[in-house]
Image: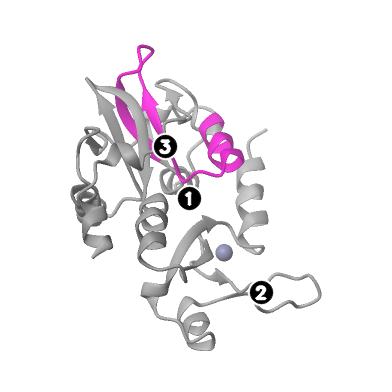
Amino acid sequence: MEFQEGLNRPVAEFMQSQVGTIVRGTTVSAVARQLLFGQVSGIPVVEEDGTVVGIVTEFDVLEALLDGKDLQQLRTEEIMSTPPVCVGEQTSLLQVLQLMVTHRILRVLVVREGKLVGTVSRTILLREVLEKESASIHELTLCYWCERVRDDFITDEDKEVWCDLSDYLDRHHLTTAEVSFHPAFCSTCAPLVKTLMKREP
Ligand SMILES: [Zn+2]
């Protein structure tokens, strides 16, 4: 029941208010570095005055790379998702979850009079709500690129072991309800992504 009660709480209680942003006009090359080093999956794009105009995700950047675009010439506004999915601070968690599922997005921006005041990601929501629901949620590291998860129970001489989610769940007798995900790049994909990024000087 606590889970249901949690869903009625306003998003302001869950949001992250310290949020990195990108000003419109920034090159995608600079954004790619910010995404990689900030270890976030998406960054809001704002005007000089803080008005939210869009959001750029890792997928948008990777898509531009695959399309052979020159990231140093490409501007953020050319690849950002706009208008971004925004909510007010009093929007309930349930409504936010519905938006995430409907739009298949990882994060929703929280705005006050058009200006960014925070973001709320699927990971934060799952952690906040499910931790109260059950103390036995396993947080798995999930690779964005190949969608494998890291198996921290297996240690292969310091080498990371990555496997399919279904294999992981079978092996450890878990269901999808008992796991949450922390996004990352796996040991195979990280060097590939870095190489792609380095292609431009
Ligand atoms: Zn991977």
Q: Relative to 162, is 125 above or below?
A: above
Q: Which residue carries the number 3 mark?
A: 16
Task: For marks 3 and 2, give the CA distance.
Answer: 31 Å
Q: Quadrant of residue 201?
A: top right
**Does residue 174 appear to the left or right of 5 in the view shown?**
right
Q: Which residue carries the number 2 mark?
A: 161
Q: Determine the secondary structure under disc 1.
A: helix
Q: Residues within 10 Å of mark 2 (few under 14, many from 20)?
A: some
The image shows a total of numbered marks equal to: 3
Q: Which residue carries the number 1 mark?
A: 66
Q: In x, y percent, where is residue 127?
A: 42, 56
Q: In x, y percent, where is residue 110?
A: 29, 33
Q: Determine the secondary structure under disc 2.
A: loop
The reply to whether residue 145 is visible in this rendering is yes
Ligand 1 lies in which image quarter? Answer: bottom right
Which residue occupies 46% across, 42% down? Answer: 61
Q: In x, y percent, where is residue 133?
A: 35, 65
